[in-house]
Image: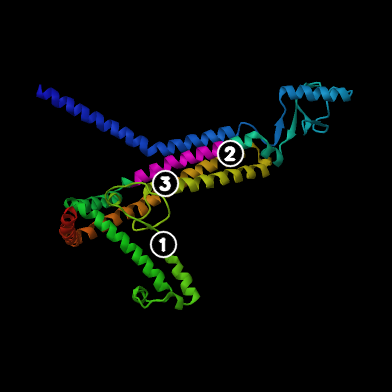
Amino acid sequence: MEQFNEDNLSKRASLYEAVDGIKSFISTFLGVIVALVGIVLVFVISSLEGIKEIKASNKENAVIMGMWREKNDSLFPEDRVDIINYNDKEYYFVVEKLTDDGEILEWYFAYDGGLGYVFKDYKFYILTGITIMVSIFVAQINYTTSVNSTMNTTKFLKTLKAYQDSKNKIAKNTQYIPMFCAYKNKQLYNDTKREIVESANISYDFYSSPAFDITKLEQWQRDILEGIKKIKIERIAPSDLLQEKSKNGRRIALLPIAPEKHRKNYLMLSSIQKFFSSILSGMTVALGVVLGNWFLGITYGFTVLLSFIMANISGADYANSGLRQRYIAKADLLNEFYNMIDYFVEQEKELAKKEVNSCENDYPLLVVNEK
């Protein structure tokens, strides 16, 4: 029975490892798969119809031919010579196939789709919209995949281990972390304030003394000191040092930008870039209509490909620099806290004594009031 259970456990472990391997493979190559599908999708859709010679539909061909024969005695217009105005477009006659005797067998009417057509036709906006959506989706998938893949590298794992070691050292004293965060927030504000004061050629000690009089300063110094009112600190909280969370707003921070914020900023900027990139690609196609519809597909497909490449580069760069440096900064702050634990223990004792003294001083007053 025990042997049977061991065999079952072994099979389950092997199954879990296989599933994890498949998940890892999908996670690694998901971005590549999405990029390839996106490129093919945009390329095919973009190439469905040319933009130089726009053929009339069967109904339009019949209507235009009827208009021609009402005003002319001949059965057919002259190939690529006669012009017929219909629905504000100038159609010309195209002979597609002749019999051996020279009689017209297959024909159609068409008009040249120039720059005006591209911006008036709904297909331009549909293709541009599809390109933007696919590019953003590809960017999102590949950015996340790139960050996750980079976080599994040996260098990043070593950084995470160092961060975990720092957390383990202070595990028994986490109750003092709020005091440490308040201390660092105040320190960051004062350091920023000092930089502004000293940039105005003013001693910070003199600025903090009662002898300081802002009315006696020159105007340029007053202008610099106005920057003190604009100081905004992105305060760290205990959860910032022990885990990741999303934050908003532009603030002076002790830590590098958080991954969620960086991803959000990248996607917002990427969306704007992809929008203008697609519009410019469409204009490029419009100006180069002589190259035909394959160039249209290549142009839009290149936008998706560029989105794929830039997302991978941006994600890997942030993970290797910003995100790894963020964990290094966390570890450094936790190590600083570890070296300052005694300071916060004494500070807590002093606060406790003040509270006790305050209660002792207030108690007689309460007794008198009761009487």
Q: Alpha-carbon distance for marks 3 and 1?
A: 25 Å
Residue 231 numbered tag: 1
**Quick one: label 3 or label 1, which is nearer the N terminus?**
1
Residue at point 57%, 40% (across, down): 300
Residue 27 x %, y %: 36, 37
Residue placed under numbered mark 2 in the picture: 128
Which quarter shows the C terminus?
bottom left
Residue 52 x %, y %: 69, 37
Residue type indicated by callout 1: Ile
Label 1: state its secondary structure: loop
Camera-nearest residue between 225 and 69: 225
Residue 278 x %, y %: 57, 43
Q: Residue furthest left?
A: 2
Q: Is residue 356 magenta?
A: no
Q: Nearer the viewer, mark 3 or mark 1?
A: 1
Magenta highlight: main SS: helix
In this picture, is 16 found above or below 245?
above
Q: Nearer the viewer, mark 2 or mark 1?
A: 1
Judge the density around disc 1: few (<14), some (14-19), many (≥20) Cα neighbours within 10 Å: few
Camera-nearest residue between 197 and 291: 197
Residue at point 61%, 37% (across, down): 125
Residue placed under numbered mark 3 in the picture: 263
Can residue 96 be seen in the rendering of this structure?
Answer: no
Q: Is residue 142 magenta?
A: yes
**Quick one: label 2 or label 1, which is nearer the N terminus?**
2
In this picture, is 91 found above or below 333?
above
Residue type indicated by callout 3: Arg
Q: Alpha-carbon distance for marks 2 and 1?
A: 42 Å
- Read off the magenta span: 128-150
Horizontal arrangement in the rendering, residue 185 relative to residue 176 (left or right): right
Residue 62, located in which quarter of the rendered image?
top right
